[in-house]
Amino acid sequence: MPSGPATENRFLTVPIGRLFLSNAVPMILVMSMGGLLNLFDAAFLGHYVGAEALTAVSLGFPVVMTTFALSTLVGGGMASLLARQLGATDRGAGGATFSGAHGLAMFISLLFIAIYLAAGRHLVGQLAGAQDDITAMAHLYLLILVLGTPLQFLLGLHADALRVEGRAGTIGLLSIGVTIANIVLNYILIVTFNLGVAGSAWGTVIAQGGGLALMIGLRQRSETLLSLSTLRRHRWYSGWGAIIKLGAPLCLSFFGIALVSATVITALRLTAEAGYADTIAAYGIVTRIVSFAFLPQMAIGLAMQSIVGNNFGAGLYHRSDATLRLALGMVFFYCLAVALCLLATNTSIGGAFAGDPAVVAQVGVILRPMFTLYLFSGPILVLALYFQAVGMPGQTAALTLIKPFLLAPLLVTAMAALAGPDTLWFAFPAADGIMCVIALVMVLRTRARGSSQAGFGASMTDAKA
């Protein structure tokens, strides 16, 4: 039953174009700030510490991506539920979901810390091979970040909650301030205090703590957001199953990215021989470029998800469909522009992050094939997030898991083994092409099973209810 005071829900009344821009632009700003920080971080490490530091943080990428995946499990699953509950004006259920997400975030983060303390050093050593100095740097970097995962998880949770509560603009302003402060702090710790990779990690953790404090303060002062007292009224161990079910597909996609990066690192260690460290450093630069380019796609998808979840929950299917179409068009042209820019600058862009000519050249070798079919990656992500927003985790799983868990690892391994390390990068456009076909088939089947009156996927959702 709906509960709580009746408040106007802008997601249900504001014209779609204006609503989408007012949510997407701040989210793009928020996500881009995080990616921009990673680029500055790589430049500080590459120019002031050296290629070995870049190699060390690159080796830690699978673990870092795993923490992001687990954070997404909680925040993404909560956001999908919370958006529909607020759309139906059921603030009581929304408060229970918000509280349960806090308990799940703390449980997973503490469990992850325990696992890393037990096995993390061994894992890093396996990826680094016999390079003890790089192993030590990578382990120190990861240890600091892993110990800070409770802050990371709670920060992501509160940001996702504010997003579906219509405060995307506020998050954008907070993100700008926190990111600028983080860049300055990282420069001081890495360059001035000469802390190297440890300075990078400490800067991130301190900034996460500051961002979380600001968001909690915002919620305490607001009369319209879910109150912090909700955390005392509801059980922290309730609703975990529903959150995990809806958050799992996107979470597993990031687990898949971690798996792919670990596969690439292992394949390079076994095949690159003398050029291994340079190639790993270049791969680390590329992963940060890819992350920077990917985060605005995710922002578009998350803004779409917030609007779709509210309107789909209220039965306004014409608005949820229009939001999906707008998001697909926007993300397609964004990905096209990114691909053209990176392909045009592939031979020189590495110089912004490292002074070693071998590393700079290897960045170009990696970028050229990886971005061949990049323009289709964004629409597939948006479609997956749409299915998650309307409660169809099976379709989300297919679009987000097949590539990282099946196609990319198999193709990377096969190409590295059969044709050498320089060819393994062609596994990525091959996987993108296959995913395009899968997404097209899924869209056609979903449309065929729906009705002209219901929204895209609504008939299938109703059938499962």
Image (cartoon, rainbow, N blue to C red):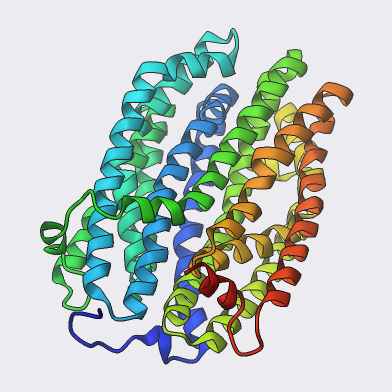
- Which of the two residues, 409 or 153, is positioned nearer the viewer here? 409
For residue 208, say whether it is visible.
Answer: no
Left of 25 or right of it: where is 203? left
Percent x, y of residue 440 = 77, 65
* Residue at the image point whose x is 51% and y is 74% from the top: 462
Figure check: 278 above or below 132? below
Residue 176 location, quadrant = bottom left
- Which of the two residues, 125 or 390, is positioned nearer the viewer here? 390
Left of 271 or right of it: where is 245? left
For residue 115, say whether it is visible.
Answer: yes
Q: How many marks?
A: 0
Left of 159 or right of it: where is 438? right
Figure check: 414 above or below 375? above
Percent x, y of residue 457 = 60, 74
Percent x, y of residue 327 = 61, 74
* Residue at the image point whose x is 33% and y is 38% from the top: 108
Quarter of the rendering occupied by the N terminus: bottom left
Residue 171 location, quadrant = bottom left
Figure check: 463 above or below 151? below
- Which of the two residues, 272 or 76, is positioned nearer the viewer here? 76
Percent x, y of residue 95 = 22, 66
Residue 161 location, quadrant = bottom left
